[in-house]
Image (cartoon, rainbow, N blue to C red):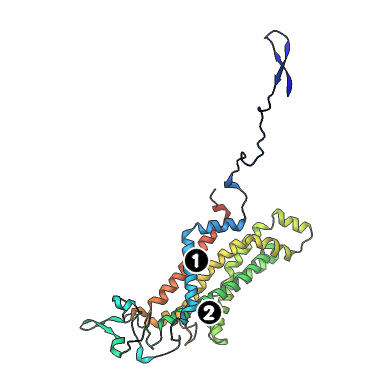
Amino acid sequence: MKKKKLVPAAAEGPAQEAEYVFQPDDFELRGNAEKTLIDMNFASQNFWKEVRQRFFSNKGAVVALVLIVLIGLLAAFGPNMTNYSYKQQTLSQKNFAPRIPGLENLGIFDGDESLKTTTGHRIVNGYQKGGFDDVYYWFGSDTLGRDIWTRVWEGTRVSLGIALAAAIIDMIIGMSYGLISGYYGGRTDSVMQRIAEIVNGIPRLVIVTLLMLIMPRGFWTIVFALMITEWIGMERIARAEVLKLKEQEFVLASRTLGARPMFIIFKEILPNTIGQIITQLMFSIPTAIFTEAFLSFVGLGIPVPMCSLGSLISDAFNSFTTHPYQILPPIIVLATLMLCFNMLADGLREAFDPKLKEM
C-alpha cells in the first residue's frame, strides 16, 4: 500500500514529493474476541438479576429472611408437633415450667422453677410433684394448663395471617388510589387527597371500637379495621412515583399512540414502581403485627379460646412476676418478627434503589 505526501525539502526550497510505503503489519484489526477487552463492570445485566445480587450481598437482610421463613414454618407446623391443642385445658398441670426431652438430663429445661417466697427462694418441679414423668411442655404451661408451645405458634399463625391479609389489601387499595390520583392530577387529585387526609385523621382505636359494636370480634374484623386506615402510606408512595414518571418519554409515547389512561397507569407506570411498592409492603407488615398485638393486649382483638401474640402477652402479663417463662416466648417471637421484617424491608429498598448501586 503506497501513499504520496508533500514535505518541504528545505526552509527556502520548493516542496518535494515524498513517498511512504505502509507494511501489512502496521495496522491490525481488533475485532476478535480474544483481543477485544470488555468492561465487565458496565456489562448489560438483567434488572432482577442485579436486584437479587444486591439483596444477597446484604447479610443482615438475608439473615432476616431466613428467620422469617423459619418462624413461618414453625407457625405452620409447630402446633402439630405436640399432642396438645391450643385450647386444651388441663388444670392439674397448670404453671409447669419448660421441660424438653433430652435436655432435662443436662440440668436445663428439666421442669425446675425457682419461686420467691417470704422465707427465700425454693425450687419447685410440678412434674415430679404430680407424678407426671411422661409429660413434657417445651415452653411450659399457662395458668389454665394449656401448652404454651402450641399456643405461641398458633398465635403466630393468627398474627401473621392478619398482618399479611391487611398488608396485601392495603397495598391493592393504596396503590390503585395513589396511581389514579397522581396520574389525573388537577381537581381529581385535590379531591382524592382531601379524602385521604380525612381518613388518615381518624384514630385507629376509635375505628376499631366502633367496629366492635356492629361486628363480632374476630380475624376479619381486625383486618377490616387495619384496612380502613393503613392504606394511606402505600397511597402516598404510589402517588409520588406516578408524579415522577408520568412525564417520561415512554408514557408520552404511549399517550401519543392512543393508549387509554388505565392502560398507561397499570401497564406502563405500575411495573416501574414495583420496587417501591414491595418495599413499602414489607414495612407495613410489622406495623400491622404490632397494631394487632396492641389491640389484642387491650382486649379488642382475637376472642378466646383463639389466641394471637398480643393476647398471649396479655394473658401472661398477670403472672409475669411469678412465672416469667410464660411471657418470654410470645415477646421474643413478636420482637423477632418486627425486627426481621424491618431489616428485610431495608435490604429490599437498597436492592431496588438504583442510586445505591456500587459502581
Residue 206 tag number: 2
Is 241 above or below relative to 161?
above
How far from the left and from the top, in percent, is residue 217?
A: 53, 85
Q: Position of residue 294 (x, y in %)?
A: 46, 77
Report the front residue among 331 and 84: 84
The one nearer the camera, 179 or 336, is 336
What kind of element bears circle 2?
helix
For marks 2 and 1 on the same chain, the one whose residue lies earlier in the sequence: 1
Q: Contact, CB < 8 Å: mark 2 with mark 1?
A: no
**Residue at which label 1 appears:** 65
Image location of residue 260, percent across then percent down: 76, 64
Write the residue at 71% across / 8% down: 13
From this view, report whether residue 275 is shown above or below residue 319.
above
Q: Is residue 178 visible?
A: yes
Q: Nearer the viewer, residue 25 or 313?
A: 25
The residue type indicated by label 2 comes to: Val
Q: Which circle marks residue 99 in the picture?
A: none
> For the residue marked with disc 1, what is the amino acid?
Leu
Which residue is depicted at the point 46% across and 68% down? 67
CA separation, marks 2 and 1? 34 Å
Identify the residue at the far top of this view: 12
The residue at the far left in this view is 119
Q: Would you call the spot at circle 1 few (<14 residues within 10 Å), some (14-19), or many (20 or more)?
A: some
